[in-house]
């Protein structure tokens, strides 16, 4: 039932830590999901420095999906978008041929509080890798949800699963689900997709006689329903879909062509990728390059 268990690797982003799960050396992708970072939970006092923010940076060949449990992030991009994402909402940014964006913590800086959420990268099919960039924001009312008396609360964040479809405009067959389980709750993940995984963001669950705790992702074998039992109140993210083939991943770039990634690196280094209109005074240099002049 469980093919592989992946433990998050803690990574300091310069002010707060994330738990990186995908890509993993022996499992680069699950369906089209090629990157999975668990942000926080991290507590901030009012007035923390701006260098904690994620400054403008580029992407190609993927969609980013940001989803929060707690906190607030201000998104700005080179399409002119500016919006705050709050718990239970989705920011869906499709880079395609190229986009730049920043993620600022302005509300947290003003008021203090906790940041806790997931950022996932979804690789685009080869015939969509160079589409024009897109951005959409989706509130709670656009995400199908379900609650039963047995202690399960479920939200379909993106894709199709359990007979419903979210409004997030995905480009290949996938599913991404947020479960909240009360202690003792049992729930099943059907064998609808060939590649499936579950990440325990909080709590502890049992699957097939094996215990999974917070910070672990289980990747499942295809072909059978997976039954979960919550050993304590738990938050579980379900993800997967149809495989789309291998991808090269370097820094913030994902693509089926290594040469295309090299071109994107050259474009960023040469300043040929437009910065966000509302956040263009600083940027993150290509790894290994000198920092920009102050």
Image (cartoon, rainbow, N blue to C red):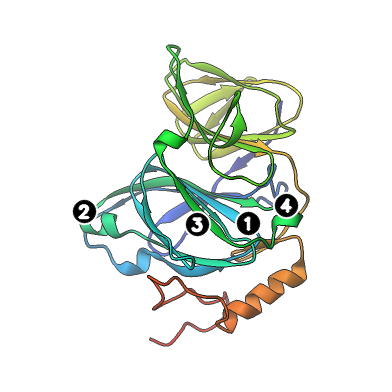
Q: Residue furthest bottom?
A: 293
Q: Is residue 153 visible?
A: no
Q: Which residue is depicted at the point 29% across and 67% down?
A: 49
Secondary structure at badge 2 equals helix
Q: Which residue is mark 1?
A: 62
- Residue for badge 2: 111
Give how far apart the Cα atoms at labels 1 and 2 are: 33 Å
Percent x, y for residue 199?
55, 36
Residue drawn at (65%, 80%), measured in percent from left and top? Answer: 266
Q: Identify residue for label 3.
A: 11
Q: Which secondary structure lies at badge 3?
A: strand
Q: Are marks 3 and 4 in contact (CB under 8 Å)?
A: no
Q: According to the image, label 4 marks what residue?
A: 125
- The answer to which quarter of the image holds residue 13 is bottom left
> Residue 192, image x and y in percent?
70, 27
Circle 1 residues within 10 Å: few <14, some 14–19, many ≥20: many
Q: Secondary structure at mark 4?
A: loop
The reply to whether dot 2 and dot 4 touch (C-beta < 8 Å) is no
Between circles 3 and 2, the one closer to the viewer is 2
Q: CA distance from mark 1 to mark 4?
A: 9 Å
| 155 vs 252, nearest the viewer | 155
Can I make out residue 277 in this image? Answer: yes
Q: Nearer the viewer, mark 1 or mark 2?
A: 1
- CA distance for labels 3 and 1: 22 Å
Q: How much space separates mark 3 and mark 2, taking CA atoms?
A: 25 Å
**Quadrant of image for the N terminus:** top right
Relative depth, front residue between 202 and 238: 238
Mark pair 2, 4: CA separation: 41 Å
């Amino acid at each position: 039932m469980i093919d592989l268990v992946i433990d998050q690797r803690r990574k300091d982003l310069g002010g707060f830590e994330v738990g990186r799960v995908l890509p993993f050396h022996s499992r680069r992708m699950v369906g089209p999901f090629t990157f999975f970072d668990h942000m926080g939970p991290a507590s901030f006092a009012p007035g923390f420095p701006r260098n904690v923010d994620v400054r403008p940076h580029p992407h190609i060949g993927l969609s980013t999906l940001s989803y929060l449990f707690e906190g607030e992030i201000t998104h700005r991009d080179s399409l002119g978008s500016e919006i705050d994402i709050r718990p239970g909402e989705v920011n869906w940014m499709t880079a395609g041929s190229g986009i730049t964006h920043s993620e600022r913590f302005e509300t947290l800086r003003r008021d203090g509080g906790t940041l806790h959420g997931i950022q996932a990268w979804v690789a685009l099919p080869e015939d969509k890798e160079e589409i024009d960039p897109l951005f959409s924001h989706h509130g709670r009312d656009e995400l199908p949800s379900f609650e039963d008396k047995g202690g399960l609360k479920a939200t379909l964040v993106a894709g199709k699963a359990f007979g419903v479809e979210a409004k997030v405009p995905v480009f290949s067959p996938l599913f991404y689900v947020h479960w909240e389980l009360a202690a003792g709750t049992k729930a099943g993940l059907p064998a609808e997709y060939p590649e499936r995984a579950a990440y325990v963001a909080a709590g502890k669950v049992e699957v097939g006689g094996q215990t999974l705790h917070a910070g672990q992702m289980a990747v499942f074998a295809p072909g059978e329903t997976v039954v979960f039992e919550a050993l304590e109140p738990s938050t579980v993210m379900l993800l997967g879909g149809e495989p789309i083939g291998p991808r090269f991943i370097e820094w913030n770039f994902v693509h089926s062509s290594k040469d295309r990634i090299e071109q994107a690196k050259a474009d960023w280094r040469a300043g040929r990728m437009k910065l966000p209109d509302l956040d263009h005074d600083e940027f993150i240099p290509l790894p290994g390059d000198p920092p920009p002049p102050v």
